[in-house]
Image (spheres, rainbow, N blue to C red):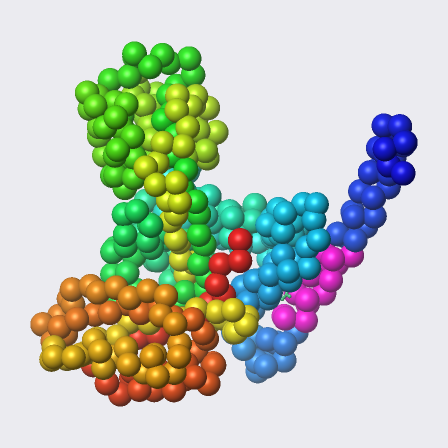
Amino acid sequence: MTDTRDLNQVRADIDAIDQDIQALIKRRAECAQRVAEIKLAEILAAGESGEPAGEVVYYRPEREAQVLQRIIDRNQGPLAGEAVAHIFREIMSACLALERPLQVAYLGPEGTFTQAAALKHFGHAAICVAQNTIDTVFAQVASGDCNYGVVPVENSTEGMVSHTLDNFMDSPLKISGEVEMRIVHHLLVAKHTPAQAITRICAHQQALAQCRNWLDLHWPLVEREAVSSNGEAARMAATIPGVAAVAGDMAAELYHLDKLAEHIEDYPDNTTRFLVVGREEVPPSGRDKTSLIVSSRNKPGALFTLLDPFRRAGVSLTRIDTRPSRTEKWAYVFFIEFEGHMQDENVRGIVGELEEQSILFKPLGSYPRAVL
Ligand SMILES: O=C(O)C(=O)C[C@]1(C(=O)O)C=C[C@@H](O)C=C1
């Protein structure tokens, strides 16, 4: 019985178990290396005169989602399923880096929630590269300089990030995944700054909006300033006397800031959703979503006609957003997101009908639903 053994004995057990885990991780990593060889051989075999038939796709989001989901499903405690899945997330990230390290562009600067989302999705072996704008995230991936990009798309308190949606209008990129992050804001100051020294509170405008009630109650008289990102606000708090920042844990760690107040967001379930964009289409994982852009003629019942095929096929819409069209010709542009994969038979039927009815039809990709 464990409780009758002394501490040294239990620690000896832990050491032995760690050794076994390490040996198994080594075997797993060697399998990943073998997978990489097979992927390369397949592409070479499909090509002509020694030239590969295309880019080798090492990262497989549908496979990763299945692995993580299975880990959660078979978990028997005492650790939480998500906690175990996070460990495997990192093991897979390291295995993939052996095959080929991924370059991931994200909306920076460092310390933003988008960086945290990129790390949550790809693990810490991915090389995350900060970009100044959503446009440059798209551009880096389209040009091939980065393999994938991560951009915010909606917040549960503040709504859509319309600039991300607008980028999809002209981009050849596909959505290859989604990441959900609980957004927890703190009031951050440089080390040992007393509350009375604060003369300005800085943050991205969305973060200020997400904490409006708390700031009104606790800091009604202090000036608020919207800056380009929470990461930038944190950098300012670290360097400019009197500045406090509203930002998250990553920014606090990166700039060695003190938390004057924690969890200051007005809505406790404040969540931001991010999209992962890439150049490849993703095969079905079994738990997928599909996003597309459609536009219909400006006539009565246009939206109803577009949505009716979903109702008839019993397919759940998870989002619909409208953006002003950027040409005279189109009256509405709808971003539609629903459960299922483009390769599913019922989805193929819906898509066929939509294509017939719309004057613009642009599939943005099918991708695994967020597991973590
Ligand atoms: O199964 C594959 O295709 C792999 O490359 C292996 C593996 C893994 O470690 O499990 C690694 C990277 C991929 O993104 C998916 C899975």
Q: Residue at x 39, y 54 (%)?
A: 274
Picture coordinates of residue 167, whole percent (x, y): 28, 61
Whether residue 220 can be seen here: yes
For the N terminus, which image quadrant? Answer: top right
Compared with residue 42, is residue 183 higher up or lower down, i.e. above or below? Answer: above
- Residue 365: percent from left, percent from top: 40, 71
320 to 110, vertically: above or below: below
Give whichever of 279, 22 is nearer the camera: 22
Q: Which of 25 and 320 is in front in this view?
A: 320
Establish if 58 lies above or below 220.
below
Which residue is at a point 35% across and 36% down the rendered structure image?
265
Residue 71 lies in the magenta stretch:
no
Whether residue 247 is visible, yes or no, is no
Which residue is pictured at 36% across the width and 12% down the height?
194
**Position of residue 44 in the picture relative to residue 169 (left or right):** right
* Quarter of image, ligand 1: bottom right
What residue is rendered at 39% in x and 53% in y?
Answer: 273
Question: Nearest the camera: 95 or 289?
Answer: 289
Q: Please, is residue 222 above or below residue 158 in the view?
A: above
Tell me residue 372's x, y (percent).
53, 53
Magenta segment main secondary structure = helix
- Residue at the limit of the structure toward the left, as seen here: 328
Q: Residue 180: x and y, percent?
A: 44, 52
Numbered range of the magenta stretch: 27-40
